[in-house]
Image (cartoon, rainbow, N blue to C red):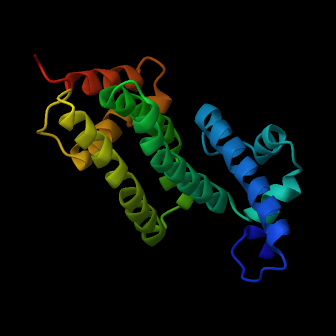
Amino acid sequence: MNDSGQGPGSSARPKRKDAQRNQQTLLEAAASVFVTSGVEAPVRDIAAKAGVGMGTIYRHFPTRADLVIAVYRHQVDACAEAGPTLLATGPTPHAALGQWVDLFVDFLVTKHGLAAAMQGDGTGFETLHAYFLERLLPVCTQLLDAATASGEIRSDLDAYQLLRGIGNLCIGAENDPRYDARQLVALLVAGLHQPH
């Protein structure tokens, strides 16, 4: 799979960059479709959203599990990369934390279909969970530390507890239209505010 961007060799570099861009487009389209329709959404919907043929998707991602795992990793990376940017551009560290948590909640909507898509691949799921923690815990810690240092939030919560709490609030939200996890998560983030 030279077009995946993983092979060595500098002569294929322009093609690899183009292939990587195409793969990014596919992953973004798949993530969008998964958020609205779930991980079992038809591949034709993803192909239409990405503006490519179904064969292109199968060439990059031979199985649904391959696609879901790639989307998961893509979203973890995007969420991790957004943290420092939001911190640098947000009006306050607490506001940046709130914006980042919104992105994290969007990611969790897709994540809840992951276990079913992997069909009992416990080792693969554990590897992804480790990747999730490795990428997102430091970013969440950075946001919490900045908001604590600015005096905006309490200092008695660590990043793991916050991520776990948000995750628990989001469980099942995609299957219950009467339950608005985002509203409860917003209350949780607001509740971090330091009383003056």
The correct choice, above or below, for 90 with respect to 123 in the image is above
State the residue lying farthest toward the bottom.
9
Q: Where is residue 5 in the image (x, y as percent from the top left)?
A: 72, 70
124 displayed left or right of 37 = left
Instruction: Identify which residue is drawn at 34% across, 40% down.
Output: 167
The correct choice, above or below, for 23 with respect to 192 in the image is below
Instruction: Identify which residue is drawn at 74% across, 69% down.
Output: 4
Counting labels gives 0
188 displayed left or right of 116 = left
In front here: 179 or 99? 99
Q: Where is residue 149 in the image (x, y as percent from the top left)?
A: 19, 37
The correct choice, above or below, for 180 with respect to 45 in the image is above
Instruction: Identify which residue is drawn at 72% across, 79% down.
Output: 7
* Quadrant showing the C terminus: top left
| Residue 131 placement: quadrant | bottom left
* Quadrant showing the N terminus: bottom right
Q: Can residue 105 be seen in this view?
A: no
Q: Is residue 119 visible?
A: yes
118 displayed left or right of 40 = left
In front here: 21 or 84? 84
Instruction: Identify which residue is drawn at 70% across, 62% down.
Output: 63
Q: Position of residue 179 (x, y in %)?
A: 40, 21
100 displayed left or right of 20 = left
| Residue 86 placement: quadrant | top left
The correct choice, above or below, for 144 with respect to 8 in the image is above
Q: Where is residue 33 in the image (x, y as percent from the top left)?
A: 67, 37
In front here: 48 or 139? 139
